Amino acid sequence: MFLLLTKIIAGLILLVCLGFLAYWFIAWKQGNCAFVLQKGKRSPYAVDFMDLTHAVLTCTVPIRNEGKQNGTIMDAFVRPYMPEEQYDKVSVRALLMDTARPREDDYWEALIVEPKRTVELRVKIFLTAKGGSILQDLEHFPDMAMDVIYQVVGRSDWAYEKGRIYLTQDELRDALYDYTAGGREHGRA
């Protein structure tokens, strides 16, 4: 009797283990979302607005769901790395938004991305001169790193991921030149 009871319990444990293995195999086969920030496909920076003490630059960077399942970007933001110890002539603030649904209030509206689809994110950088002139204060602006940080969820638990993009001195200089060469300096569009 004891041997029969032991065999029944062992058989039930084996069935439960096989059930878990089958579940995990099916979940693995179905896949998950896998977001990739396509930094190499980032657009050039462009000046959207400039006056005597402010400049606003934008660029777009694509993010692609390379996975097999829908994924949701629950939250996203950009964090510029320009501490005053490195460069104290300009205040820097950045904003991230979905280009299809732009928002200026620094709120991220959750976004569902289907497998093998790409969406465009817009990075908006606000530069404010601490001296008298934005052009003079940006003269020696160093390369600036920015992390695009996004919270994603799919079939598995949510996770934060990030990718780093840069605003280089040369890119800033080119964007400012293109803007002023077009006769749009100092708030004129």
Image (tube, rainbow, N blue to C red):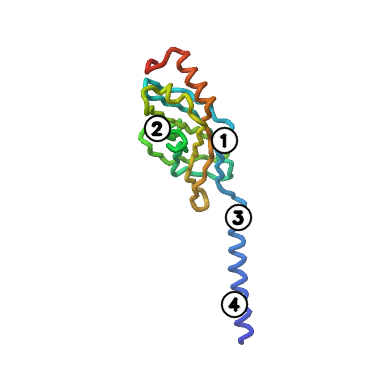
Q: Is residue 35 above or below residue 57?
A: below
Q: Amino acid at mark 4?
A: Ile
Q: Amino acid at mark 1?
A: Gln
Crowd rating for badge 2 (residues with CA inside 10 Å; few <14, some 14–19, many 20+)? some
Gap in Å between the C-alphas at discs 4 and 2? 68 Å
Q: Is residue 157 above or below residue 125?
A: below
In-front residue for pair 183/116: 183
Residue under the point 38% across and 22% down: 133
Gap in Å between the C-alphas at discs 4 and 1? 52 Å
Residue, disc 1: 38
Identify the mark at residue 91; answer none if there is no mark: 2
In-front residue for pair 110/171: 171
- N-terminal of the two: label 1 or label 2? 1
Residue, disc 3: 26
Name which quarter of the figure residue 65 lies in. Answer: top right
Q: Which type of secondary structure does the marked residue at label 4 adopt?
A: helix
Residue, disc 4: 9
Residue 109 falls left or right of residue 19: left
Q: Which type of secondary structure does the marked residue at label 3 adopt?
A: helix
Gap in Å between the C-alphas at discs 3 and 4? 26 Å
Gap in Å between the C-alphas at discs 1 and 3? 29 Å
Residue under the point 38% across and 27% down: 129
In-front residue for pair 169/36: 169
Residue 115 falls left or right of residue 74: right
Please state the horizontal and vertical placement of residue 28, each as a whole percent of the image.
61, 53
Q: Which type of secondary structure does the marked residue at label 2 adopt?
A: strand
Q: Amino acid at mark 2?
A: Ser
